[in-house]
Image (cartoon, coloured by chain):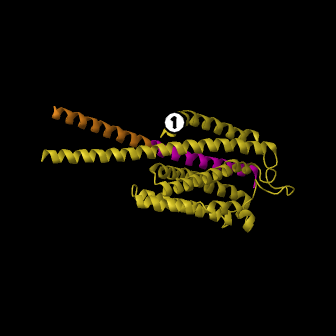
Chain colours: A yellow, B orange
């Protein structure tokens, strides 16, 4: 409660402004400053947002899993709210990945989609958390469903390390641009490309934090609303009893 | 594939990303407004109920 009050001015005032400014700088870097990649041409610039969206999706699902562990352990509603908010934000970024990836793949691979291990596991990740959201939407305040959803959030995050190592483990088509071994000629080597990736990372991180905060606050307000409804229901019942 | 064609893919990807973000923000804003409105209505109802109760006790 104290932490939330202290964070509120920063999260409501500073975060959206900082995220917007950082996003404009990132866009300027991507479209005006960074050079074209030799082999792929301009379409490689999708990478700066695609990769960062993937990182924020993983962050969202990671936060959801950690908050779900705490919810199962302590049973406090704020951890459940945080997990729910993190899954929604993670799903937004995961959808960005699944939409921008095929648009990059079409001119580079000649196909919109292939059942490459990384792509397939990312789709599985998206499906797991889509089920989570359906579960939450179907039974909004059922504590049993909240516990099932928490277990699902924890199980789902196990897919994230698999996605990260899948390129090396199963030698799929998906490029390993960041961690390519030195001397192979792969990976990003131009300093402007690295700088653009870092700027986009900061912009996406700020955006992630702001969206997470907004969604968490929204869920907190909704819980407050339900508590008030219960209070009014109890008052109405006692008034009816008194009238009789 | 020529460069202008590849530019089309580049802009499509960024347009898709921004559209998704805009849809999420619109949904977030609508939900927030609806919850805030309901909360204010309930608080007002609760306050009027409390004042009626106090008046009837007097």
Residue A176: image location, x then y, percent: 75, 58
- Looking at the magenta stretch, what is its main secondary structure? helix
Q: Residue at x 59, y 42 (%)?
A: A207
Q: What range of the chain is rendered magenta?
A: B1-29
Q: Which residue is mark 1?
A: A8
Q: Residue at x 52, y 39 (%)?
A: A3
Say which of A236 and A212 sits in front.
A236
Residue that sits furthest to the front in the current view: A74
Residue A166 as seen in the image, left or right of residue A81: right
Left or right relative to A179: residue A152: left
Q: Residue furthest left?
A: A244
Quarter of the view holding residue B30: top left
Label 1 resides on the chain identified as: A
x 65%, y 37%: residue: A22
A179 or A116: nearer the viewer: A179
Instruction: Answer whether residue A11 is magenta in the image.
Output: no
Residue A216: % across, % down: 49, 45
């Amino acid at each position: 409660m104290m932490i939330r009050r202290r964070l509120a001015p920063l999260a409501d005032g500073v975060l959206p402004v900082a995220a917007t400014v950082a996003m404009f700088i990132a866009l300027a870097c991507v479209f005006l400053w960074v050079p074209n990649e030799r082999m792929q041409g301009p379409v490689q610039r999708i990478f700066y947002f695609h990769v960062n969206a993937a990182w924020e999706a993983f962050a969202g699902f990671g936060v959801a899993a950690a908050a779900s562990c705490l919810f199962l352990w302590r049973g406090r509603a704020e951890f459940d709210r945080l997990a729910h908010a993190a899954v929604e934000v993670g799903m937004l970024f995961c959808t960005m990945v699944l939409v921008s990836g095929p648009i990059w793949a079409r001119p580079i691979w000649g196909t919109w989609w292939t059942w490459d291990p990384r792509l397939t596991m990312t789709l599985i990740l998206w499906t797991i958390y889509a089920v989570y959201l359906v579960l939450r939407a179907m039974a909004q305040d059922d504590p049993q469903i909240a516990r099932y959803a928490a277990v699902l959030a924890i199980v789902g995050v196990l897919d994230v390390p698999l996605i990260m190592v899948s390129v090396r483990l199963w030698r799929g088509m998906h490029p390993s641009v960041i961690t390519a071994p030195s001397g192979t000629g792969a990976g990003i080597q131009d300093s402007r490309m690295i700088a653009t990736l870092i700027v986009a990372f900061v912009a996406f991180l700020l955006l992630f934090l702001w969206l997470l905060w907004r969604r968490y606050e929204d869920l907190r307000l909704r819980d407050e609303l339900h508590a008030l409804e219960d209070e009014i229901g109890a008052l109405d019942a006692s008034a009816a009893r008194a009238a009789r | 594939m020529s460069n202008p064609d590849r530019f089309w893919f580049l802009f499509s990807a960024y347009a898709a990303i921004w559209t998704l973000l805009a849809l999420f923000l619109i949904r977030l804003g609508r939900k927030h407004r609806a919850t805030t409105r309901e909360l204010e209505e309930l608080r007002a109802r609760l306050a009027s109920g409390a004042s009626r109760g106090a008046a009837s006790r007097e």
